[in-house]
Image (cartoon, rainbow, N blue to C red):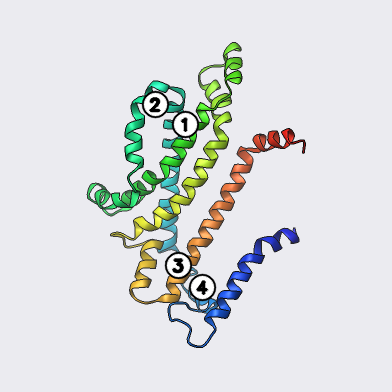
Amino acid sequence: MGLRLLHVLALPTLIVGVYWAVTAQPGASFYTPTPAAIASAFADLWFSERFFVDVLPSLGRLLAGFAIAAVIGVGLGVLLGLDARVRATIEPVLEFLRAIPPPVLVPLMIMLAGIDDSMKIMVIVFGCVWPVLLNTVEGVRAVDPVLSDTARCYGVSGLTRLRVLVLRSASPQIMAGLRLALALAIILMVISEMFASSSGLGFAIVQFQRTFAIPEMWAGMVLLGVIGFLLSSLFELVEGRVLGWYRGLRAANRGE
């Protein structure tokens, strides 16, 4: 346990130490405050009511957008993966939409949905749905045909076949798509809050930059990193539970 903790903390400690040594030099830039100044601003900002004003709304939008994208991506991905004719019909439109960067849709979504939370959630959904959708399609298409024929011979069909065979077989790629979508959700959450917003981490960081509150701006970026790390760690725990059978199978195949 101690050795693993050392491995986790060694590089971050080294980076902070080097940054501290550079910023502690006389004549250091105003735009690179010391870690002590950033830590002080972090404590003043995020251990106060601003946590409820900016951080919680951002997390709510992020999780809502991610969840909606996951449902749409997996549902549509299963349909396209199972039916080649539907896939051939819809795929050109999907490829066209996928080529549109989500940030450029912000002005359009402001006109359609206003400047409330729905606009920000729509931006997150539009950007996050693609890795989930594409990975689900490929995972469903890659289901072992021998297993599929065996299930058919034993009369396994309908929802049971979908749950036991299709989703279980495609789950490694689905989880890979969800992991990519989670990283995108954090980015799009910040971008959507930089436009016509009055709360959220993206809004707060832009305001700090405009008012030259540099330590506070850095504190916001550090908080984003902390949130990303915590969400990634939580996702890894869920992934370990969902893919326990898959990792066990791979270990057995390797003779471990």
Nearest to N terminus: mark 1 or mark 3: 1
Q: Nearer the viewer, residue 51 or 176?
A: 176
Residue at 35% across / 62% down in the picture?
199
Q: Is residue 63 left or right of residue 169?
A: left
Residue type (three-letter) at the residue carrying disc 3: Gly
The image shows residue 229 at horizontal and vertical percentages of 55, 57
Residue under numbered circle 3: 220
Residue type (three-letter) at the residue carrying disc 2: Arg
Circle nearer the viewer, 3 or 4: 3
Q: Residues within 10 Å of mark 1 (few under 14, many from 20)?
A: many
Residue 249 lies in quadrant: top right
Q: CA distance from mark 3 to mark 4?
A: 11 Å
Residue under numbered circle 2: 87
- Mark 4 secondary-structure assignment: helix
Q: Is residue 5 left or right of residue 106?
A: right
Q: Does the residue at mark 1 contact the one at mark 3 (Cβ under 8 Å)?
A: no
Q: Residues within 10 Å of mark 2 (few under 14, many from 20)?
A: some
Quarter of the figure with the N terminus: bottom right
Residue under numbered circle 1: 137
Q: Does the residue at mark 3 contact the one at mark 4 (Cβ under 8 Å)?
A: no
Residue under numbered circle 4: 43
Residue at 37% across / 72% down in the picture?
209
Circle nearer the viewer, 1 or 3: 1
- Mark 3 secondary-structure assignment: helix
